Amino acid sequence: MSEEVAVTHGRLRGRVAEDTGIRSFLGVPYAKAPHGELRRRPPQAVEPWDGARDCLSFGPDAPQAGPAPTSLYSGGNGPQSEDCLYLNVWTGPEGETGRPVMVWLHFGAFQFGSAANPNYDGEQLARQGAVVVSVNYRLGRLGFLAHPELSAESGHGASGNYGLMDQIAALEWVRDNIARFGGDAGNVTVFGVSAGAHSVHCLRCSPLAEGLFHKAIAESGMGLSLPVEGDGDPAAMQSLEAAEDTGVELAELVGAPTLVELRALSLDRLLEPQLPRTAGPWGLDFLPPGATVGLAIFDAGYPVIDGYVLPRAPVEVYRAGEQHPMPMLTGTAGNESSGLPFIGDSAVFQAEVESSFGPLAGEVLELYPADDQTRYNSGRLLSDRMFTWGTWTAARLQAEHAREPVFYYRFLHEPPLPDGVEIVERANARAFHSAEVNYVFGSFAARDWPWDARDEELGRLVSAYWLNFARSGDPNGDGLPEWPRLSPREPSTMFLELPVHTGDLPDRERLAFWDRFYAQWRGFRTDLTVKAS
């Protein structure tokens, strides 16, 4: 069965599920194809079309070089094209109105991934009453490369962040059209995992996104990354100056030093070479080409503090309590290191820690020992620095400075990861990075894993919490265990495992170390210090 809906630029023909009445509109264009002269420019409005446009299949993925299809972190692996600015909508039967809107931003370190990933199928959340929108956006060197010539032509003296501008354009499309799908344009939640969660924090700090969404869910994101200070911090964001320098270096490396040449360059040549930088001892085989743990995590492919889309580093905005005001739900998985580089040699790990942390190295090695668990400990050091500390800091700064509530979780349930799925550190997979996604979406059918009744029960609870939050800014509801708003001075972390329960903040000692580290090394101080128990 099919159905047509009129949007601002024409009519869309979608599919209607006969058994449930759920309507899906896949591959909906929200901006022009950003190729040719539009490569590395802000997204442009779609040209109107005549007749009804079939929206029965996903649009192409953004160009990328991601993990293999057998990887746990496969990005979807569909056809790729620069013509990638499409979104997808799942909603209820025609005639329903006022549904909360949930806009999903996919994972992939801003380097890979796709809204077509079957783990993000929005049908189950739509069955529970939401309108779900998933968004493709430009990635890597097409989405975030900065260059002095790009900044000069922009009219606002900045470049990079085209992928964030795509996300903002998609939210503008939602504002203008979602009521036609039964959604409430005044009740939009942006949610995402990993890079999607980092995007949520960036959007909350961007003046260009003001008023476009009203609630935030950030799952296992880098949280509040700090600006580059020339110290090689792997959790850093680049300043515009540093990003432009990287762009110039890359342009020279590919033999296209001018903007005209860069726009005319073939995709294969643009995406092929890596900048000649030392990646350090952490293994990088899993990560896509261009990954480093030096000046920036990914060369020319990560959000930039550009003075326009992001006038200031998100951590500074949150410290001042000046992020867009809204309720927030945020947290991390039990083992965020599962998809990160690691060091397997204890002697190499100890030497790297001593070189990187100087007088604090002894304390680091007490918390992350160079022993028979070095592989896991080295990854956990990186993940605590990148994910856990930043997410916790975003949560506590909002709890301290904002009137709007924040709800904090730790996802500890271990999915039934079968043999044959590639993961960096299988022996310590546990509740791996992004493990909660299938439970949020109820998309267990997307993975042929041995799910059981406990998985389904936790999925029912988690998706209900997420949907309740999208409705009202509070995850609580009838039949659900109470989830208190975060109070950093009281036990108020929600542990998502069976049975779900609340308790004190885990990892206090390690988080307290990172507080001291950033205070001493970077001059950064939070207003709400974690005290080791």
Image: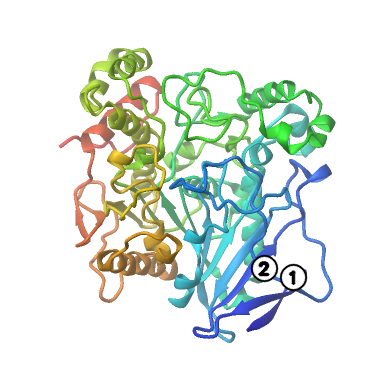
Residue at point 82%, 69% (across, down): 49
Name the spot of residue 72 as percent of width and height, x first: 43, 47
Q: Is 192 displayed left or right of 521 in the figure?
A: right
Residue sitting nearer the eye, 367 or 414:
414
Residue at point 65%, 41% (across, down): 143
* Residue at far front of view: 420
Q: Are marks 2 and 1 in contact (CB under 8 Å)?
A: yes
Residue at point 65%, 48% (across, down): 62
Sort mark 2 into few (<14), some (14-19) or many (20+) by Cα contacts within 10 Å: few
Residue 384 location, quadrant: top left
Q: Amino acid at mark 1?
A: Thr
Q: Amino acid at mark 2?
A: Asp
Position of residue 377 relative to residue 363, above or below, is below
Q: Which residue is mark 2?
A: 176
User: At numbered mark 2, what does the secondary structure look like: helix, strand or loop?
Assistant: helix
Residue sitting nearer the eye, 102 or 529:
102
Quadrant of the frame with the C terminus = top left
Q: Which residue is mark 1?
A: 8
One can see residue 68 in this view: yes
Residue at point 32%, 61% (across, down): 450
Residue sitting nearer the eye, 449 or 370:
449
